């Protein structure tokens, strides 16, 4: 019997240009010829990050990476490797990047095959509570390399040259931030990990910490060395008890191994980390508010400049980065900025983690190279929309972001393309929305959130969002007026212009983007009193249909006695009396109540 | 947002023991640099011990840390995680994260409000349930999700939600 193989062909742009698709066709011909189509399957993957050696094919099991292939190599691979089971050493790339350890294990799976795990490289592979596991996957090697082989300036330069941009939302150049903080004379300096994860539909940072806490510790220690800080703080949500426990243990273990504390690894660099808990305020994810919160005060933002890199925690120079940003640092130091730069697009390097959820078959945490399209994420990795429903929109950036319709599905994921399309990259929330959701209602959902979370310092953010919410509420109740849409737009732009911090400056985005892309839905609510998704309860009617057996449950539960009927006979709802509370709908055991 | 993690941890210690534990904790924090910055940590500790932040406890914190009570109130009320009223016997945290919302959390919330006759942030008159909002419990794959004490219930419908409440009620009667 012949062995079973799964071949992954890199379908990234560079590999395609160097002939990957032609080789795939050729490979298929040869498999046909040798009758191997049953036992050998071919899959495509997003950019594997080895663009300079394309075209790339990975043969699993065994994780043999073949690179720089030509047409003549294909029959040899089929005959030697696939039939005789002897990998061809001459064509194989012996590269050991941190990320490809993951693919040795999971690279042949469709869900993972499209992904590239750089920051999540250890998640699901190592025991997060074992420092030995982390060490065995070259953990803390980057820290050792930085301290022994590199000057702080070289570390900063490496990070800067990698093109890494902040993963917390704003996408500011990480290297530049490090350089600013390093340039400050004042001491002590602080390094902060922002693990406040505010987006209400996302859990990337939490999973990253729960899955691989040492990566964050290592990244922060490297930064401490690079910018001249001796103290790190992880500001993490109190709602994440498991993540808190794991990062606490990681810090203790690192300390016990001499990787934190006085004289790290015997050098004259000293660095330690402590944990501070957030307390459930979205605005505390904003860096100046976060600093106030660590100081023990109310988390109110303050104007910048001065930026935290100049005047931050306790008035000292402070470097703040997001969890995912930190997880990239050991990779950049160990595999080098030059390698890191090969992944991603012109302006956005590396990968991005998303918490994919909503109306999509596979929900979960994914990591893809920048430049992957929304369509690939939703349909190839996500498996499309469940129950044969129709896609309506994809929401990125949470309460600061926007909703993109079908025509934007081919937008590549990077900071600039998403911004141009009218949304933002955000911190990694990605919610798929289908025909059953009302876009006005979604906009209202986000605005309710931000309105509730506004710290109240600026009037436009505090009061303006309230006015917008009132208008949205009346539209969803069928009481919208002509001119409401324009009013929302005017208010939205005013709030964006006149708010102090990112919360207010982005709060109107979900409303403005749904108006831009789904204006008809707003108009239908206002002029026709119609909600096409049947989500706005005031705009629908409940009717009893013929599956009714006359059990009387709905009649008993209706608070306004709008339902009548005799036992065992079909009941009816008096539409004049009905208050649309939906109690009957929720009570009926026979699905005999329909929303129309 | 107070999730049940804190309330679940509430110890059965006596009042005197709790106070002693709190005082020890405060004393430890005060040995650090920037002692005032530990206020939020201290409030977390207090809520862990008491299940919420009683007024007397905040007065105690004020005295021990040398911070005006008014400032402590300001901080405690700013953060959603801190609760100034005692929680119900069972704490229901309804996930109002985006994924859950898109999958019908709104209807679940409505069903809960109708069934318990309380609003979010309130406790039922019999003290049995309190209802709290949560933002993404990290179980989006099971959306819509509700956490009762520390148990996650997923793929809910309004009907199942009501059934679940009734189960808890039945158990209480036993
Ligand atoms: C309202 C608001 C909420 C934010 N929430 C978060 C958050 O939860 N996590 C995060 O890392 N950054 C958040 N940020 C961005 C931070 O202010 C800051 O830019 C970021 O932590 C910097 O790290 P980075 O450069 O690595 O992205 C938020 C910003 C605003 C305005
Ligand atoms: S914009 Fe809103 S959240 Fe930000 S400082 Fe002003 S009021 Fe506070
Ligand atoms: S949004 Fe509810 S669990 Fe994530």
Image (cartoon, rainbow, N blue to C red):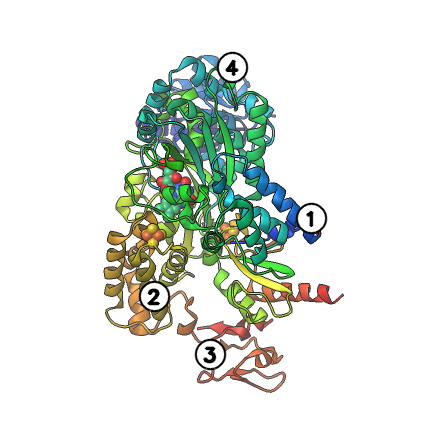
User: Given contact means CB atoms under 8 Å apart, are the residues at marks 2 and 4 in contact?
Assistant: no
Mark 3 falls on what kind of element? loop
Q: Are marks 2 and 4 on the same chain?
A: yes
Q: Of the residues tagged 3 and 1, which is closer to the observer?
A: 1
Q: Nearer the viewer, mark 2 or mark 4?
A: 4
Disc number lying in front (3 or 4)? 4
Please name which of the two marks, 2 or 3, marks the residue nearer to the observer: 2
Q: Are marks 3 and 4 in contact (CB under 8 Å)?
A: no
Crowd around label 2: few <14 · some 14–19 · many ≥20 (10 Å): many
Mark 3 → mark 4, Cα distance in angstroms: 73 Å
Spot occupied by residue A455 in the image (x, y as percentages of width and height): 38, 54
- Which numbered mark, 1 or 2, is in the foreground of this view? 1
Viewer-nearest residue: B10 or A58: B10
What is the crowding at mark 3: few (fewer than 14 residues within 10 Å), some, or many (at least 20)? some
* Residue at the image point whose x is 49% and y is 53% from the top: B69
Which corner quadrant holds the C terminus of chain A? bottom left
Q: Which residue is mark 3?
A: A579
Please name whichever residue, B162 or A313, is drawn nearer the observer in this view of the structure.
Answer: A313
Residue tagged 2: A472
Residue located beneath label 4 in the image: A266
Left or right: where B71 falls relative to A53: right
Q: Are marks 1 and 2 on the same chain?
A: no
- Sooner in the amino-acid sequence: mark 3 or mark 4: 4
């Amino acid at each position: 019997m012949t062995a079973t193989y799964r071949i992954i062909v890199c379908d990234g742009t560079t590999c395609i240009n160097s002939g990957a698709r032609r080789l795939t066709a050729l490979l298929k011909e040869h498999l046909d010829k040798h009758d191997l189509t049953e036992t050998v399957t071919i899959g495509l993957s997003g950019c594997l990050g080895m663009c300079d050696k394309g075209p790339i094919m990975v043969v699993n099991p065994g994780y043999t990476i073949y690179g720089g292939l030509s047409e003549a190599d294909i029959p040899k691979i089929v005959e030697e490797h696939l039939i005789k089971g002897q990998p061809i050493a001459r064509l194989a790339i012996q590269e050991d990047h941190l990320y490809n350890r993951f693919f040795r294990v999971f690279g042949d799976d469709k869900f993972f095959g499209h992904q590239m795990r750089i920051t999540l490289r250890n998640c699901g592979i190592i025991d997060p509570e074992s420092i030995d596991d982390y060490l065995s996957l070259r953990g803390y090697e980057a820290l050792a390399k930085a301290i022994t082989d590199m000057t702080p300036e070289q570390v900063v330069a490496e990070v800067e040259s990698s093109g890494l941009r902040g993963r917390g939302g704003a996408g500011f150049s990480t290297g530049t931030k490090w350089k600013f903080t390093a340039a400050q004379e004042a001491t002590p300096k602080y390094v902060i990990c922002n693990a406040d994860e505010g987006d209400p539909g996302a859990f990337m940072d939490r999973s990253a910490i729960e899955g691989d806490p040492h990566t964050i510790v290592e990244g922060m220690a490297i930064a401490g060395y690079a910018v001249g800080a001796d103290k790190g703080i992880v500001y993490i949500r109190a709602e994440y008890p498991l993540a808190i426990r794991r990062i606490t243990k990681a810090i203790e273990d690192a300390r016990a191994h001499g990787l934190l504390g006085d004289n790290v690894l015997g050098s004259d660099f000293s660095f330690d980390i402590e944990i501070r808990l957030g307390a459930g305020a979205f605005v505390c994810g904003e860096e100046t508010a976060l600093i106030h919160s660590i100081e023990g005060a109310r988390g109110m933002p303050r104007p910048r400049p001065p930026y935290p890199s100049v005047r931050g925690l306790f008035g000292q120079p402070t470097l703040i980065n997001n969890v995912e940003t930190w997880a990239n640092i050991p990779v950049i130091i160990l595999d080098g900025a030059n390698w890191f730069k090969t992944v991603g697009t012109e302006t956005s390097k590396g990968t991005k983690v998303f918490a994919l959820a909503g109306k999509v078959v596979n929900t979960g945490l994914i990591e893809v190279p920048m430049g992957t399209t929304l369509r690939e994420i939703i349909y190839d990795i996500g498996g499309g929309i469940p129950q044969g429903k129709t896609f309506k929109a994809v929401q990125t950036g949470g309460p600061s972001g926007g909703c993109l319709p079908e025509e934007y599905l081919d937008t590549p994921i990077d900071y600039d393309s998403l911004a141009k399309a009218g949304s933002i990259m955000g911190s990694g929330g990605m919610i798929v929305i289908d025909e059953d959701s009302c876009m006005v209602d979604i906009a209202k959902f986000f605005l309710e959130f931000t309105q509730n979370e506004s710290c109240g310092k600026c009037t436009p953010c505090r009061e303006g969002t309230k006015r917008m919410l009132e208008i949205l509420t009346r539209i969803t109740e069928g009481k919208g007026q002509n001119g409401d849409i324009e009013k929302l737009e005017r208010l939205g732009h005013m709030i964006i212009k006149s708010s102090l911090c990112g919360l207010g400056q982005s709060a109107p985005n979900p409303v403005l983007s749904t108006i831009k892309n789904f204006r008809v839905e707003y108009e239908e609510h206002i002029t026709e009193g119609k909600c096409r998704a049947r989500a706005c309860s005031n705009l629908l009617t409940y009717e009893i249909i013929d599956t009714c057996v006359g059990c009387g449950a709905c009649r008993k539960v209706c608070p306004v006695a709008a339902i009548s009927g005799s036992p065992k006979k079909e009941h009816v709802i008096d539409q004049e009396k009905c208050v649309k509370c939906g109690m009957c709908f929720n009570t009926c055991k026979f699905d005999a109540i329909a929303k129309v | 947002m107070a999730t049940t993690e804190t309330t679940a941890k509430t110890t059965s210690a006596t009042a005197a023991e709790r106070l002693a534990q709190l005082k020890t904790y405060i004393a430890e924090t005060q040995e650090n640099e920037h002692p005032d910055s530990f206020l939020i940590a201290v409030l977390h500790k207090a809520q862990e011990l008491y299940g919420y932040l009683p007024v007397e406890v905040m007065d105690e914190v004020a005295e021990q840390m040398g911070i005006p009570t008014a400032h402590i109130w300001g901080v405690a009320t700013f953060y959603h995680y801190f609760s100034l009223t005692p929680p119900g016997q069972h704490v229901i945290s309804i996930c109002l994260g985006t994924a859950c919302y898109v999958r019908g959390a709104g209807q679940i919330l409505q069903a809960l409000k109708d069934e318990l006759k309380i609003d979010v942030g309130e406790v039922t008159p019999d003290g049995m349930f309190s209802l709290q909002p949560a933002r993404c419990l990290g179980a989006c794959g099971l959306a819509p999700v509700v956490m009762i004490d520390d148990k996650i219930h997923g793929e809910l419908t309004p009907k199942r939600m009501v059934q679940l409440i009734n189960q808890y009620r039945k158990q209480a009667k036993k």
